Amino acid sequence: MTAILEIDNAFAGYGGGNILRGLTLNVEAGKLTCLVGPNGAGKSTVLKVVSGLLHPRKGEVRFQGQSIGKMSPRAILMQGIVQVPQDRSLFSTMTVRENVLLGGFTLSHHAEKEQRLEEVMTRFPIVRERAKDTAGSLSGGQQKLVEFARAMMLDPKLLLVDEPSMGLEPRVRRLVFDTLQELRAEGRTILLVEQNARSGLEIADVGVVLERGQVRLKGSGADILADPSVGAIYMGTSGRLKTRVQDAPAPTGNDVIESAPDGAS
Amino acid sequence: MNGGLLLGASVLGLLLGGIYGLMASGLALTFGVMRVINVGHSALVIAGAYMSYELFAHLHIDPFVSLVITMPVMFLIGMGLEMAFLQHLREDREQFSVLVTWAIALGVEGVLGYFCGTDLVQISTNYANSSFSIGGVQIVYIYLYGFLLGALLMGLLALLLRRTTFGWSLRATVLNRQAAQLIGIDVAKVSAIAFGIAAAMAAAGGALYGMLNTFNPGSWYDLIGDLLIIIVLGGFSSVRGAFIASLVVIMFQEILSVIISPTWADWSFFMLLAIVLIVRPSGFFGVKTREA
Amino acid sequence: MMMSVNPMLLELDGVSKHYGGVAAVDLCSFSVAERSITGLIGPNGSGKTTVFNLISGFSKPDAGQIRFDGKVLNGMAPGSIYRKGVSRTFQMARIFPRLTALENLMVPVRRKGLQGLIWGYKGVGEVEAAREMLHKLSASHVADELVGRLSYGQRRLVELGTLMMSHPRMVLLDEPAAGVHHSVLETLSRYILDAQGDGVTFVIVEHNLNFVMDICHHVVVLDRGRTIAEGAPDDIVDDQVVVDAYLGD
Amino acid sequence: MTRRLRIAGWLLVLVASLLFPLVFTNPATLSIALVTLMYVGLASSWNILGGFAGYISLGISAFFGFGGYAFAITLHAFNVQAGYTPFAWLPLIGVLTAVVAIPLGWAALRTRQAVFVTVTIALMLVIQLSAENLVSITGGATGYGFPIPNWSAAFYYKPFYYAMLTVVVVSIAVAYVVRRSGLGLGLLAIRDDEDKAEAIGVPTKSYKLAAFVISAGLAGMIGAIFAYSVLYIYPQNAVDPLISMGAALMAFLGGAGTLAGPVLGALILAPAQTELSYYVNGQLYLILYGALFLAIVRLLPRGIIPSIGDQLRSRSSRHVDLLEHDGHHVEGRVDADDVKVMEGVRE
Amino acid sequence: MKQTFCIGRTGAAALVISALMVGLSLSVVGGGASGAASKSPITIGVSISETGDFSPDGAADMNAYSLWAQLVNDSGGILGHKVQMKFVNDASSTSQVVTNYTTLLSKDHVNFVFGPFSSLLTIPASEIAARYGYAFVEPSGGSQAVFNRGLKNVFEAEPQAGYQDMLSFGDWVLGLPKSERPKTAAYATEDDPFIGPEVAALQAKFEAAGIKTVYNKTYPIELPSYAPIALGVAQSKAQVVVLGTNLPDATAFTQTFIQQKYNPLAIDYASGPDQGTPWVKAVGAKNVAGTTVPLGWLPTLSTYQNKAFVAAYVKKYGGNAAAMSTDAGEAYSVGQVMAQAITAAGSLSNTKVIAELHKLTFKTVQGSFAFNKQGIPNGHVVLGQWVNGSLQIIYPPAVATVKALFPKPAWGTK
C-alpha cells in the first residue's frame, strides 16, 4: 500500500473555528478514494487544504513524502495536484479551447501544450467538437467534462474532484461518474468528494466517511456502501438509530477510526 | 446651422474620441482585473506626455517614434507602483484604492513639477498644423494619426487579450479569480502586468494629449473627471465599452458645442451620466457588472 | 401533537424554477399549516434552498403559484414579502458583523415617524425587548460583543433573534443546525418550540434529521425539485424512498 | 473606555476649543485653527454617509462650495450688512444645501461602491461647472464677494472661529444623534450587508438619502463660513477636490465610522497640511503629502481609533474565550475575506 | 525656464552671480552702499502658487521677485536696509493663501508684502493686507473685482488696468485708413474673470465704430478640445478675430486656423503671443508673424532699468531675452514701485508708503505710471505684434519700433 498523499492530524478552518479537527487520512496511489459525509463534515475543506487554498493550522500534509502544507496553490499545482472545483469554474466568455489550454498554463513549452491538448481532445471529444464555442454556452454537464479536460492538461499525479454531480441532472450525472470511472480505470489517483454517497462509493476503491472534521469510517467503497451506519451518519440520525445499528453486523475488517461520541441528542 | 461645420465637428469628435478612448481603456482595464479605481490614471497620462515632451525637446525624437521608449518605461513604472502600493490592499479594495491612487497621483505631480517645472508646455511637431481636405472637411493629420494610433493600440490590446497565453490568463483572472489561481495563474503577477499595460496605454495617450494640448504637472485634475465618467458610461470594467463610450461622448460634446454652445457642451458628460444613472445604472455599453 | 386542523398559511402550487436548462424546482407543491413546524428535507441539490428563495422573493418562480395567507406572493420584492410577515435565515448566517449582538437585534425594529428615526434606538423598551430575546436564546453574555467575533452557532442564534424581533408570522430557517454545536442546537430547538407555542409558523430546511425529527410536526421531502414524500417525521425516516434519495441513486 | 471617561474626554476637547482663541491670540495661529475646525466639521459630516453607511463620497466639496455660493448670494440678495448678522443666516444655508442635495443624492445613490465613488467626483465637477457657467447668478469665473466686516486684524478670525466651532459642535452632535438613532443603526446595517438590511425591512433608500442630505447640509454651512472668512468665492476655491480628499483621508486616518475618529484625524492632519505647505517647497510638499497618504493607508488601514480599540480588546482575553466556546463552522462557506470584513472598523 | 526654485538655491545662486552684478548695479543707482550692512534687513513676504491651477505663472513671479531683491541689495538696499524675500507656497489654494499672508503679517512680521499672481488669490490676500494696514502692490490682478472692493491699499503695478488691455488693438484698427478698415469681427473668449471684460470693452468699441459682429462665443476654460469653437470662428470668415485667450487656448485656436487655412486680416489675443519662446514653440516659428497682443512689458523696451533687468535675468536663469514671460516684467515692476515708494516715504511705515503710492509717478520696466484712488494705474498698454521673428511694438506710433503688418501675412509664410 503506497500512500501518495498523507494527511496527518490536520486542523484547519476559517476565522475562529476549526473545520478539520485532527484529520488523518492516506490516499493510495492509483486508486479512487471517495470522501462522503454530511454537510459540514469538512469534505471540501480537505480538498482546499490539499490544493493549498487553505493552510492547515496544525498537522502535516505530505505528497510523495514531501511536505506541501505551506505551499502556494501554484506550487502545489506544479507538484502534480490538480483540483476540479465544485462551483462552475470555467471562464465563461472564453472559448472551450482557450479554457482547456489554460489548464496547461504552467507548461512552459508550446509544443508540449499542443501535444497535451491533442491527447486531451482525444480523451474528451467534446473539447474538439465545441472548441470554438464560449464555455458559457455549454450545458452544465458539458462544462463539467471540459473542467475535467482542463485538469487533465497537466497529466496530474493526483486529481482532486469536488462534488462533480452538484446541480446536474441525473442523466448527466451518470456521464460524469462514468468519466470518473474511466479515469480510475486508466490508473489515475483520484480524491473525490461527493454528496451523492451511492454514486461516489459505487465507483470508489476506497470509501471514507467524514463527520465533524474527522474520519469516522474507512473501508472499501463496497463495504462502506453496505454499512448501514453510513446512512445514519449521513442523515444525521446516528444517535437515534443507534439501537438499530447495533443489531447490524459490525464494519468488517477495515481500519475504522471511531470518532469521539458526539452526543448529538 | 452650417452643415459643413456640423460634419467637421463630428469628424473631429470621432477622432478625438479615439484618443480619449486610448486613455480611458487603461482605466477600465485596471478596474476589471484588480478592482482598483485608479484616480491617478490621468497623472500617468501627464507623466507620459512629459516623457514624450522631454525626448522631443532635447533629443528631437518624434513623439510617435519615442513611444517605443516611453511605453516600456511607463509599463515598468506602472508595474512598480502596483507592486509597491496596490498589491497589499485587501479590505474594501475598491474604495481604499481611490485614496492610494490619489496619493500616487500627487506624488507623480510633485516629481514632474520638481524635474520639469510648472510652466505650460506642448509637444509642437512640425506637422502639428498640417491638414488635408476631404469633401470640404479639413482633416488634421495629428488628430488622424492620434486616432489611428489609438485604434492600433486598442487592436493590439485586443490581440494580446485574445491570442496570447498572458492575455488568456488576464481574462481568466477577470472572470474568476479563484479558478485562475487553481490552474496555476499567478494573479498577483497578472495584476501587476495589467497595471503596467494600463500605464503604457496612458503613456501613448499622454503623447497624443501633449501634442493637442498645453499641459503642466497639474493638468491631470482636468482630465480625470472626464475619463472616470467615460468608464462609468462604458460599464466600468469593459475596455471595449470605455472605447465606444469615449467615441460617443466626445462626438456628442463636439456636436453640441457647435449647434448650441461650448458652455452647454461642457455639460454633456454630466447630462449623459445623469441619464445613465436614472435609466440604466450599469452603463450604456457595458454588460451589467457585479459591483453595480 | 399534529395540528392539521389549522388552516394552511403557506401553499406552493406547482412551482417551478429553471436555471440554464436545469430544473432546480420542478412542479413542487406542498402546504404549511399555521402554527406548525414543517421540515423541508432532501439530499443536496434537491432544491430546498431554491424553494426558500422563491418563497422569500429572492428569486422569481418560472411557473406555479405561491400563496401566503391566501395572497399570491409571486413577483413581490423581498422587502414586501418580509413586511407581510415572512422572514428567513440564510445558509451562511447573514448578520451585521460590525454591530453588537444587541444592535443586530434592534435593526429590524419598526420605527414610526421622524421621532422614531432620530430617537436613540437604545430607548423605550427596545433594549429590554432585545435583551429578553437574547436571554431566550441563551445569548445574553454576548449582547455587547461584535457579532463578527462570535462563533458560527452564536451568529445563527443572533440571526434568528434578529428575525424574531419583528414578530414574523412565518420563519424560514435554512439549515439552522449545520455546523452548530450541540449545546447551541438544544437552545435553538427549545426556542423554536417556544416561539411556535406563541403562534409562529416555521419551515426548516435541514440535513440533521435528528433535529428535524425532534421538533417538526410535518416533514416534506424534496428530491430533484419535486415533493417525493410527505408525512409525520417517524414515517418519513423509515421510508426507503427517502433513504434512497439521500444516499443517491 | 468607560462611558464617563469618554464624556470627560469630549468635554475636555470642547473646553479647550472654547478657550483656544483666548490663549493663542496670534491671528496666524487662529487662521490655522479655523482651517482645522473646518476639516473637523467636514470629516465629521462626511463620516455620516462615508463612515456609517460605508458609502465613500469624494464629492463633499460640492456641497461645501454650494453653501459658500448660497451664502454669498443670499447676503447680497437680502442686503445683509457685514458683521455678525450674516451668521444668523447659516441655518437657512444648511437647509438650502440639504434641499439641493436631495435630487443629487437620489441619482447618485442608485449606484454602489466604485461607481458611487466616481459619481460623487462627477457631482463635484457639476457644481463647479454650474458656478462657472451660471454667470448671472454666480458671477461666473470672476467669483462673488462678501460684505467686508469692519473687524481689526487681531480680532478678525475670532468670530469666524466661534461660528465654525458652533457648526462643528452641531456636526458632531448630529453625528452622535444619528449614530445612536434608528437611522444610524440602519446605516451601520447597510454598511455591513445592504441586501440583508433591505430584506429585514430597513428602508435603505431613504436612510442612505437621509445620510447624504444631512452630510451635505452640514458641509454647506461649513463652506459658507469658510467663504465668508476669506471674503471671496470663485469656482476653484469653492469646489476644490483637495478639500474632498482631505476630509475623506482625515476620517480614514482617525477611523471612519467612529465618532471621534474623524475629529482626531482632522486635528492631526489639517494643521500638518497647512504647516507643510507653508514651509516646504511646493513640489516636495506634494510628494510628502502623497507619501503621508500612502503611509497612513498602509500602516493604519482601519484608522487610529479602531487600531487602539483592537489593542485594548486583544489585551482582554474575553473574546478569545467566546471564539473557542464552540468551534464549529459550517463547511467551506465562510471565506477568509468575510472574516476580515467582519473584524473591520468599529468604535 | 525649467527651473524649480527653492529658497536654499536662491542663496547659492546669489553668491555666484553677485560679483557680476556689482558693476552693473553701481551704474544703475550709484553709491549709497555704505552702512547698509549695519541696519536690519527689510523682509518682504510673498505667497507663490508653486503647484495647482496658478502654478504656470508662479515660477516667473518668483524668479523676478528674487532677482529684484538681489539687484537692490547689490546696489546697497533700500534706505540702507538689505532686502530679504520670504517665499511661501500656497498650492493655488485660497485657505492656504489666507493662512500664508496672515502668518507673514502676524507671526513673521514681515515689513512688506507683494501680491501673488492671480486676482482670484489677490482678492482674499489684499483683504488681509488691508486689515493690517499694509500696502499691497500686485503684479497682474487686473480685474475690476479687485478694485471695486473699496480698499485703499491695493495697487496694480501695470501701466493700465488689466480690463482695458485690449483697447489698444481697437485704437490701432480704427486708426487704419477707412478703405482698409475691416468690416466684420469674430470674438471668442474663455470664461475668465480678467479676459472677459477686456474683450467686451473691445467689442463695444468696434461695434460703435460699425464693425459687425459675425461670431461671438464665451467658452469654459477646460474643454477637451477648443477646435469646434475655432471651427466656428473660421466658418464665420470674419475679417478680424479677437481671442480672449491664455496660452493653451491661444495655441489651440491658432493651430485650428492654420489647419483650416483661415487667414483673417488681423488677429488679436488677450494673451499667448506675449509668452515669448513658448508661443513660438507652440505654434511654430513660421506662423507667429502678424499675431498681435497687448503688452505691458517687453524685453526690448527701453524703459527704466529694463536692459539691466533683462540682462541679469537671462544671466541668472538662462534662456534668452525673447523667451522671457511678461509675468517676469510685471513682477519686477512691483519691486521697483515699492522701492521708490519706500525711498520717498523715507520710512518703513506702510501708512507712509501707501500715501506715497497714491502720490508718486513710478518709473518701471513697463514704463511710467501713477495710481488713482482705487489703485488703478493711469498709463497705457502698447500693442505688440510678431514681426520678423520678434515681438515688436506697433502702436501707439510714438513708441512703435516697427511698421505693423496689415493685413496679417498668411500662416506659414514667414
Image (cartoon, rainbow, N blue to C red):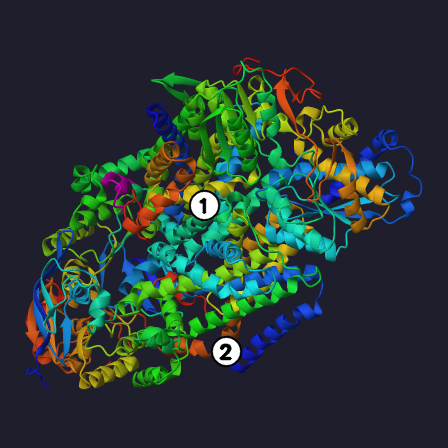
Classify residue A67 by image quadrant.
bottom left
Q: Return the chain for callout 2.
A: D
Q: Say above or below: C203 vs C25.
A: below
**Residue A96 within the segment the image draws in magenta:** yes
Say whether disc 1 or disc 2 marks the residue closer to the N-terminus: 1
- Provide residue A158's location: percent of width, then percent of height: 29, 52
The reply, left or right, for residue E263 in relation to residue D328 is right
Residue A258 placement (x, y as % from top left): 26, 75
> Please, is residue A141 above or below residue E242 in the view?
below
Residue that label 2 marks: D316
- The stretch of residues the image draws in magenta is A91-101
Which quadrant does the C terminus of chain A fall into? Answer: bottom left
Q: In which quarter of the view is residue E194 placed?
A: top right
**What is the distance, in whole Å, between disc 1 and disc 2 at their CAs?**
59 Å
- Eyeballing the image, is E165 above or below A64? above
Tell me where residue D246 sits by quadrant: bottom right
- Residue under label 1, please give it: D134
- Give the residue type at disc 2: Ser
Q: Does residue B264 show up magenta in the picture?
A: no
Give the SS element for disc 1: loop
